[in-house]
Image (cartoon, rainbow, N blue to C red):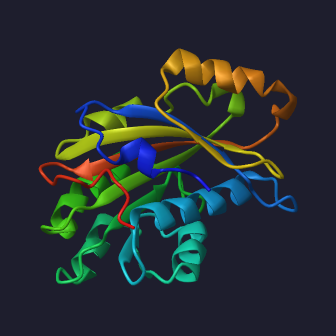
Amino acid sequence: MITADTATRGHTDPGPALAMWWLNTDLTMPTASGLATRLTRQLVLTYTNRDDTVVSLTGDLHATAATRLAGRNLIAVNAPGDLATIDRNIPPTLITAQWPPARRQPDDTILADLLLSCRLISGARPATIAVITPVAESAAATDPQPQLAAVPGLSHRLDAIALSRPGEPERFLFPLTMPEAAALVATRGAHADTPAARIRVFSVAGLAGAGGPQR
């Protein structure tokens, strides 16, 4: 299992950290879709408890399956206006976004608006925000969306590079520098066609403890 607690619990550095996940994805589905499903499930299990509420900002099917199978409640949001329907008495513990979305043209302005709106729905309870961006494995150690780190009101806590490794033991490597991450990706040259993703983990500004697991 991924030892995510060692990556986040007790972390006091105000800057973002870098980690790498080898995910033992389904041998029958070694695709970007399979990686996204496995990754979302790991995020849900790491950052939420049973019966917690998860908000999917892009309403993707990976979040739907992972959340319900784990016994969490799911709210799907596709536009900032949809946030008005969320019950403020049941604030989410985890907010996810698969970006770019699979079912419409990506619009970074909409994503920024959605992330800003997370402050309104998080309430007083700590909330974790995870933005998942599929990337080519050869480019996994580069930042595909540097503008996200500058969204006001959010604290950028962790970046993680996820690589699909069907049939291999799962690993969570932390902390890493960018050169170390690039070197690790380069050593996996035999898996050059393996799907990869970059995950940016944020917490709502001013809420302590949102970067750590909620188990």
Corner quadrant of residue 83: bottom left
**Left or right: 65 with respect to 122?**
right
Residue sitting at x 84%, y 52%: 167
Q: Which quadrant: the N terminus?
A: bottom right
Q: Which quadrant: the C terminus?
A: bottom left
Residue sitting at x 40%, y 62%: 47
On the question of residue 77 being in view, the answer is no
Classify 45 as above or below 190: below
Classify 41 as above or below 35: below
Viewer-closest of 58 and 46: 46
Classify 156 as above or below 141: below
Residue sitting at x 18%, y 67%: 125
Percent across and percent down for residue 196 are 67, 41
Viewer-closest of 25 and 199: 25
On the question of residue 44 being in view, the answer is yes
Percent across and percent down for residue 211 are 31, 50
**Left or right: 87 with respect to 140?**
left
Classify 168 as above or below 95: above
Residue sitting at x 43%, y 51%: 5
